[in-house]
Image: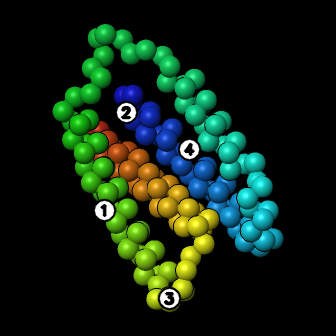
């Protein structure tokens, strides 16, 4: 497993964990009222913990013999980025249509809700990017074994 795969696994697990925790915090905020959501310290604490963990895991320098990125890695990253890019547009268009149906043409969306929408679009597109990266590495590994 190369460094790109390790990074994709770590980031995929981190995104799933963040998505789960933030979804539960948002649902709890909706159930109890919006003010409790704003005072939750988990929203700021979890990304800091993940950043520290990422720094500790990836601070090891790569050896000079090991290739950092080859053509296959660049192609895999480019394809995953294209899939994530289309995912962002699909999610934003779906968000626009759903918000239009819910609030109407002359309605408004609170800024905090808009912030949550953009955050979840970013988080879901990140999940798609890392999953697409791992799927492509899985395809290429199976091709090399046979």
Task: Give the Cα distance between marks 1 and 2.
Answer: 22 Å
Label 3 near label 2: C-beta < 8 Å? no
> Is the residue marked by circle 1 packed among few (<14), some (14-19), or many (20+) residues within 10 Å?
few
Q: Please tell me which residue lies in front, 107 or 57.
A: 107
**Mark 1 or mark 4: whose residue is earlier in sequence:** 4
Which of discs 2 and 3 lies nearer the camera? The answer is 3
Eyeballing the image, is 17 above or below 4? below
Which element type, helix, strand or loop, lies under badge 4?
helix
Q: Quadrant of the N terminus?
A: top left
Q: Rate crowding at label 4 as few (under 14), some (14 to 19) or many (20 or more) other CA atoms within 10 Å.
A: some
The disc placed on residue 86 is 1
Position of 137 compared to 113: left or right?
A: left
Q: Residue at x 61, y 42 (%)?
A: 47
Label whose residue precedes the other's in the sequence (2 or 3): 2
Q: Which residue is mark 3?
A: 106
Q: Check residue 14 in the rendering and tell me which mark sits there, or answer none.
A: 4
Q: Are marks 1 and 4 in contact (CB under 8 Å)?
A: no
User: Of helix, strand and loop, which one carries label 3?
Assistant: loop
Q: Residue at x 65, y 57 (%)?
A: 22
Residue 86, given in percent of the width and then of the height, sits at: 30, 62
Image coordinates for residue 72, horizontal then vertical, percent: 21, 36
Looking at the image, is mark 4 or mark 2 earlier in the sequence? 2
The Cα atoms of the two marked residues, 3 and 1, are separated by 28 Å
- The residue at which mark 2 appears reads as 4
């Amino acid at each position: 497993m190369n460094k790109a795969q390790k990074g994709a696994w770590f980031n995929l697990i981190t995104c799933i964990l963040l998505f789960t925790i933030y979804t539960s915090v948002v649902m709890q905020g909706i159930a109890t009222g919006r003010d409790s959501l704003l005072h939750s310290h988990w929203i700021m604490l979890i990304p800091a913990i993940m950043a520290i963990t990422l720094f500790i895991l990836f601070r090891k320098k790569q050896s000079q013999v090991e290739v950092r990125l080859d053509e296959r890695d660049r192609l895999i990253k480019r394809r995953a980025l294209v899939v994530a890019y289309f995912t962002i547009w699909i999610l934003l268009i779906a968000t626009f249509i759903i918000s239009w149906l819910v609030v109407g043409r002359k309605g408004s969306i609170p800024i905090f809700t808009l912030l949550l929408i953009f955050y979840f679009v970013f988080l879901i597109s990140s999940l798609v990017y890392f999953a697409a990266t791992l799927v492509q590495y899985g395809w290429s590994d199976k091709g090399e074994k046979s």
